[in-house]
Image (cartoon, rainbow, N blue to C red):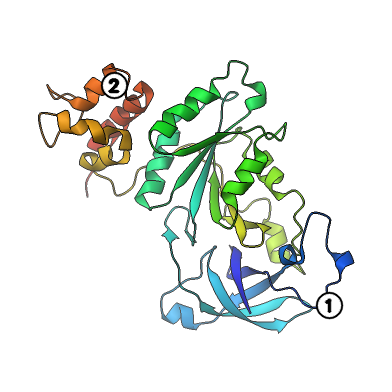
Amino acid sequence: MQGKIIRGVAGFYYVHSNIVHSDIVHSDIAPGSTAEDKGAIYECKAKGVFRKDHKKPLVGDDVSFDVLDEEKKLGNISEILSRHSELIRPAVANVDQALIIFSIVKPQPNFNLLDRFLIMMQQQDVPCVICFNKTDIDEDGIGASYEEIYRKCGYQTLSVSAKKQQGIDTLRNLLEGKTTAVAGPSGVGKSSLVNCLQSGTVMETGNISEKIERGRHTTRHSELIAIKGNTYILDTPGFSSLGLFDLEKEDLAQYYPEFAEYEKYCRFGSCSHIAEPVCGVRDAVQEGRIDRTRYANYCLLYEELKGKKKY
């Protein structure tokens, strides 16, 4: 059989298979679900050959596995299928995109943190969708301006309300058929949105072992949640800070795509866009063509990288 690893705990891998046996009858399927949504989760161990080849199964891996006990849903992973992507942070395979969630208000968005996340995903060639939550309490309509800032930078954006169920269908369509890493700081309503996306979905867990039950509320491991068919979301732990890894200050500007069209007006080809006498990027900031907050974050991150110790 084949399936996708949705969780890994202490050497056990929980594999979601969409294959539905013929003994499932119509009455077993919840309203709003199809037989294809049903599937099952098998608790599997990885064969020793992977250790010999120094290849470790990751959450998100598509795998082949042998069923050892159908009733108890136990199996052995026999093959890790080809990966089309592999993230370092979080360690997960086959992610198609990232959904980064911030609230419009309460709390106010931390744009420095948002930019850090976007850079981290760009470094790993993962497209990002930026989702601003809590439109229901956005009395001044400021969420639209936040969307516009990042849309001009080339990112896909949307605003939603988990509380009022506004924009959820649009969001669900953006996730359709993909594996999406979902992340956001605490207090932005990430859990509420994840719950909205799961509504009407039934996924049998079989006899999940006590091992996973004991760690369910304390583990910091990432976990894939099947939404429908081949649509998964990767629920990652909340974050409050992100360091930039393997990045030199000279390379930072390339992660601000809105700079590109103005760099040709810089006097120096190696312009840092910080203090040089003639700089097209700084001129664009002064003229309002580049967002001031984005540029201020760039300057802060540049100084952080400048002060980074080299070993």
- Mark 1 lies on a secondary structure that is loop
For residue 242, what is the image quadrant?
A: top left
Q: Which residue does the numbered mark 1 point to in the structure image?
A: 23
Percent position of residue 264, x then y:
16, 33
Residue 39 makes an appearance in the image: yes
Q: Is residue 51 left or right of residue 4?
A: left
Q: Is residue 40 left or right of residue 279?
A: right
For residue 27, what is the image quadrant?
A: bottom right
In the figure, 208 relative to 137: above or below? Answer: below
Residue at point 31% right, 33% down? Answer: 258
Q: Which residue does the numbered mark 2 point to in the structure image?
A: 285
211 or 123: nearer the viewer: 123
Percent position of residue 173, x then y:
61, 48
Q: Is residue 242 left or right of residue 245?
A: right
Q: Give the Cα separation between the discs numbered 2 and 1.
A: 64 Å
In the figure, 239 relative to 176: above or below? Answer: above
Per the rendering, the mark at residue 220 is none
Pick whichever of labels 2 and 1 is earlier in the sequence.
1
For residue 150, what is the image quadrant?
A: top left
228 or 194: nearer the viewer: 228
Q: Amino acid at mark 2?
A: Val
Residue 242 makes an appearance in the image: no
In the figure, 16 relative to 275: above or below? Answer: below
Percent position of residue 202, x then y:
77, 58
